[in-house]
Image (cartoon, rainbow, N blue to C red):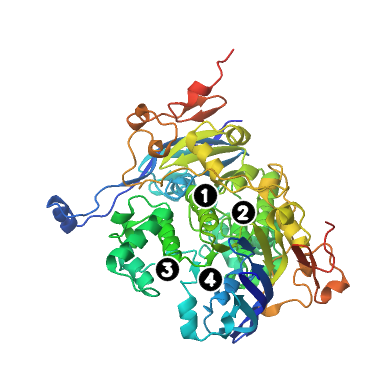
């Protein structure tokens, strides 16, 4: 396998737009926010062809911003994203149709005034991927693929439930015949019984179409189920990356371990694992702690963690950004 | 006698499109210090059940029948003034969005003093002391300083802690928590769940924890009630229900959990979607999605109780 989707040293800052007045006021000592949020702060990653990468983190960790940059719908402050060696964005605009996105909220991602068929066909027609004559076939084919009857094409989004709308959003993405699907929390707003249906749909699509996927979620059990590899983010940086089973079985970063112990998990015996919450709050991304961003909440932090930023480096079979990670590793022989 | 006994509660919404039976004959009991998990998907009536208990259902909704007996007193027969006296004092509520409780233009201290004044005549110093004690109890550091802050200065998790502190100001006998951790991050949710469990046990407060997520409820509830289309379809001690569910819906939910499956394997999903409450199928509402359904399921299923457990199904799964 080779790197298919590749992100190199991605950075995205969000700076407040300051008027001249704001600037003067700030100079005079007024409380004007001039700091930039480093939403994504130097992230490099690769996704191999046919692979599903899970991107996990809590709010404000930059996972959605990273997802948007990978999809080419947001420009990075620095760094590049390439697909098969070609940049996904050129000249300030998305340069490829091969990456498509499915968003979290199917209530706001579908135009309420368009019929389902128009929603699905719009992209391929605009981009010349399909002709008018192929329109009906394209619509019914993709609705079927997403598990909806083709007759639904004449309906409007409000006639559907949340799960069905998410299927429409998936059909719309598939109609572009993408190689890569970026899914940003696609099951987070769905009911329990519907979540399983959509997860199964993703499993089917992965197998049928050989799609490469980036699956962004805060829900560890969903990510574990769907991903081959996972990357854990905290305040703009990847803190751990590795094969899903390795990361879940033996997390190398204390944040990953804490996150795993914070999720209510249930197995068929009906026994819940007791929770072991991480102490403290997620710091403001406006002023992240120095050194390792996680050190104020880390049960194992040493003085070095507060001054020196750990780099993401090989630990065991995966990668971890922790000063202490290597010490636990058994010596190789 | 149980602390709370709900019997045949029915809350209907009289909409232009017809009568929506959001809560359709719900009965359950709650003991002192017990944590009941009320679980269901959107539209199952779980939240409306919570609102109905304390008379917070707004028109076009109305509690049309049933009893909510708290310490022997039927809350559904009380006047608005009498209900106002019970709310916050005997029975309190925490919402999904803490800003439903908090007023954005008042400091935390002012809001807590006002909440105390609603039921008690306390001097300012005594009120402050009580507020500080409660903030401390819900795990807020430096509570005295927090009294001077406004809600927007706090994080989502902190706001929810404050909302819980306000709900507990009068030592209520029952706390109804409607998805209190759904909007929070995983690590903060774990903190709040642990705190709520600890508080309920330490203070002897009975807790009704309304949630859409079985796994979340499983970490703190003693008893579980599963709702579907306005009815409780299964209830019992949580571990017993989850380890051997008797209603096909509960069993289906358990099987479809990704955490219970082999990674990458197809999940045994429940087909179809929950019915619209305005257009409920006759008999068992789950029948159109159920693998065990037959013609008998066109009729109302009986509620069969077996010790602490009960199930509403024509073909309950073998225990």
Q: Residue furthest top?
A: A333
Which marked residue is nearer to the observer: mark 3 or mark 2? 3
Residue B204 vs A6, above or below: the answer is below
For the point 64% across and 63% down, the residue is B39
Q: Position of residue A138 (x, y in %)?
A: 66, 59
| Residue B141, image x, y percentages | 36, 50
Mark 3: secondary structure: loop
Tag nearer the camera, 4 or 1 = 1
Density class for disc 1 (Cα within 10 Å; few <14, some 14-19, many ≥20) is many
Q: Which residue is mark 4?
A: A112
Chain identifier of the residue bearing label 4 in the image: A
What residue lies at 55% left-to-right and 24% top-to-bottom? A316
Mark sitting on residue A237: none
| Disc 1 to disc 2, C-alpha distance | 37 Å
The residues bearing labels 4 and 1 have C-alpha atoms spaced at a distance of: 37 Å
Q: Which mark is residue A174?
A: 2
Are callouts 3 and 4 both on one chain? no
The answer for how far apart the CA atoms under marks 4 and 2 are is 20 Å
Disc number lying in front (4 or 2): 4
Q: Chain of mark 1?
A: B
Q: Are marks 1 and 3 on the same chain?
A: yes
Question: x and y percent of residue A304 in the render?
Answer: 35, 27
- Residue picked out by circle 1: B190
Q: Earlier in the sequence, mark 1 or mark 3?
A: 3
Residue linked to disc 3:
B101
């Amino acid at each position: 396998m080779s790197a298919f989707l590749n992100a190199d040293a991605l950075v995205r800052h969000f700076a407040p737009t300051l008027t001249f007045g704001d600037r003067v006021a700030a100079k005079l000592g007024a409380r004007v926010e001039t700091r930039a949020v480093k939403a994504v702060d130097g992230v490099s990653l690769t996704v191999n062809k046919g692979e599903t990468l899970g991107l996990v983190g809590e709010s404000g960790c930059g996972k959605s911003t990273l997802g948007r940059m990978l999809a080419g719908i947001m420009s990075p402050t620095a760094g590049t994203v390439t697909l098969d060696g070609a940049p996904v964005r050129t000249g300030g605009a998305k340069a490829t149709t091969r990456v498509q996105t499915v968003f979290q909220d199917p209530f706001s991602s579908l135009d309420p005034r368009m019929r389902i068929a128009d929603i699905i066909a719009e992209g391929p027609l605009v981009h010349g991927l399909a002709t008018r004559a192929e329109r009906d076939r394209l619509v019914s084919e993709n609705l079927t693929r997403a598990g909806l009857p083709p007759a639904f094409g004449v309906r409007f989004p409000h006639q559907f439930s949340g799960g069905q709308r998410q299927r429409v959003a998936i059909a719309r993405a598939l109609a572009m015949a993408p190689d890569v699907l970026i899914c940003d929390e696609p099951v987070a707003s769905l009911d329990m019984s519907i979540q399983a249906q959509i997860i199964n749909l993703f499993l089917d699509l992965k197998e049928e179409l050989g799609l490469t996927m980036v699956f962004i979620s805060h829900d560890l059990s969903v990510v574990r189920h769907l991903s081959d590899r996972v990357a854990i983010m905290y305040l703009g940086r990847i803190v751990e990356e590795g094969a899903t089973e390795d990361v879940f079985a033996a997390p190398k970063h204390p944040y990953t371990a804490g996150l795993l112990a914070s999720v209510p998990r249930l197995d068929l015996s009906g026994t819940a694992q007791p929770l072991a919450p991480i102490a403290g709050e997620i710091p403001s991304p406006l002023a992240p702690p120095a050194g390792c961003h996680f050190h104020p909440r880390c049960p194992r932090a040493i003085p070095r963690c507060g001054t020196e930023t750990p780099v993401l480096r090989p630990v065991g079979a995966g990668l971890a950004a922790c000063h202490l990670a290597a010490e636990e590793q058994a010596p190789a022989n | 006698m149980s602390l709370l006994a709900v019997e045949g509660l029915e809350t209907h919404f009289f909409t232009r499109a017809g009568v929506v039976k959001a809560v359709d004959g719900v009965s359950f009991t709650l003991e002192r210090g017990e944590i009941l998990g009320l679980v269901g998907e959107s539209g199952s009536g779980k939240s409306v059940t919570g609102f109905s208990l304390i008379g917070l259902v707004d028109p076009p909704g109305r509690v049309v029948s049933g009893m909510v007996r708290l310490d022997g007193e039927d809350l559904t027969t009380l006047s608005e003034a009498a209900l106002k006296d019970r709310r916050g004092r005997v029975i309190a509520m925490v919402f999904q969005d803490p800003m439903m409780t908090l007023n954005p233009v008042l400091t935390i201290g002012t809001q807590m003093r006002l909440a105390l004044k609603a039921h008690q005549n306390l001097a300012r110093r005594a009120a402050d002391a009580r507020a500080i004690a409660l903030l401390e109890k819900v795990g807020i550091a430096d509570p005295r300083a927090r009294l001077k802050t406004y809600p927007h200065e706090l994080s989502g998790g902190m706001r929810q802690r404050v909302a819980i502190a306000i709900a507990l100001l009068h030592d209520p006998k029952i706390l109804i928590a409607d998805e209190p951790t759904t909007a929070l991050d995983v690590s903060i949710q774990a903190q709040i769940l642990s705190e709520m469990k600890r508080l309920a046990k330490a203070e002897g407060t009975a807790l009704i924890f309304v949630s859409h997520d079985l796994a979340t409820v499983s970490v703190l509830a003693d008893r579980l009630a599963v709702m579907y289309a306005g009815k409780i379809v299964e209830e019992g001690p949580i571990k017993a229900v989850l380890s051997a569910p008797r209603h096909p819906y509960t069993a289906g939910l358990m099987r479809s959990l990704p955490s219970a499956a082999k990674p990458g394997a197809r999940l045994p999903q429940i087909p179809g979607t929950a019915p619209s409450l305005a257009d409920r199928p006759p008999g068992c509402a789950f029948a159109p999605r159920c693998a065990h359904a037959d013609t008998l399921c066109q009729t109302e299923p009986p509620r069969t109780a077996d010790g602490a457990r009960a199930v509403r199904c024509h073909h309950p799964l073998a225990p």
